[in-house]
Amino acid sequence: MRYPLVWANPYTSEKILQVHHLVAAKLFIKESADGPETVLDDLKDVRDKLYDLQRPFLEPANILVAPVEEGDILVWFNRGLRHSAIEYPSIGYGPRVAHQVHLAASDSPAEPEPIQQGSK
C-alpha cells in the first residue's frame, strides 16, 4: 500500500502527520505538487528519515500513560494519535486482554490538498 504522510481528519480537515516508521519500506518524495518524484528505498534511510520527522513530538509533555484500573477499557482515535504498547506487569495484574477494533478499516486515509505557499 502507498499512503500519504499527511492525512486529513475527515471531520475537521485538520492535517496530521501519521506514519509508522517501523513498517514503511519506501518513501516517494516530491518537493512540490507538480515537481519530479524521487524514491528513497534504502530501508535504514527510510526509517531514519521517518523517525526524524516524528522525534520532535516524542517529548514528555506529549506522552500520556493512561491511568487504568481493572475492568477499564481504553479507546483512542487510531488515525489521529501515535500510540505504542508499554510494559505490562504479568505478576499481580492477571492476563492482559487486548482487542483491536477497526471501525474505519475499509476506508483509506484521505489525502489533503497540496499546501499553498505561505499557508499552514
Image (cartoon, grey):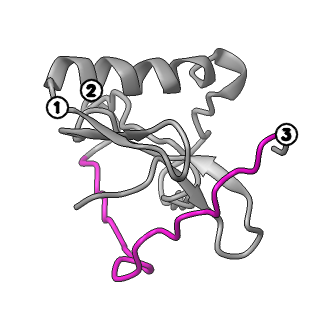
Towards the viewer: 46 or 78: 46
Is residue 52 toward the left or the right of residue 17 in the image? left
Residue at (57% x, 21% y) in the render: 58
Q: Secondary structure at mark 2?
A: helix
Measured Cα–Cα span from mark 3 to mark 1: 31 Å
> CB atoms at circles 3 and 1 under 8 Å apart?
no
The tag on residue 118 is 3
Query: The disc labelled 3 sits on which kind of residue?
Result: Gly
Residue at the front extreme of this rendering: 35
Q: Is residue 32 rendered magenta in the image? A: no
> CB atoms at circles 2 and 1 under 8 Å apart?
yes
Disc 3 vs disc 2: which is toward the camera?
Answer: 3
Q: Give the residues in magenta.
A: 95-117
- The residue that disc 2 covers is 46
> CB atoms at circles 3 and 2 under 8 Å apart?
no
Residue at (51% x, 61% y) in the render: 73
Q: Position of residue 95 (x, y in %)?
A: 24, 48
- Mark 2: few, some, or many residues within 10 Å (few <14, many ≥20)? many
- The residue that disc 1 covers is 41
Query: The disc labelled 2 sits on which kind of residue?
Result: Val
Measured Cα–Cα span from mark 2 to mark 1: 7 Å
Q: Position of residue 112 (x, y in %)?
A: 61, 63
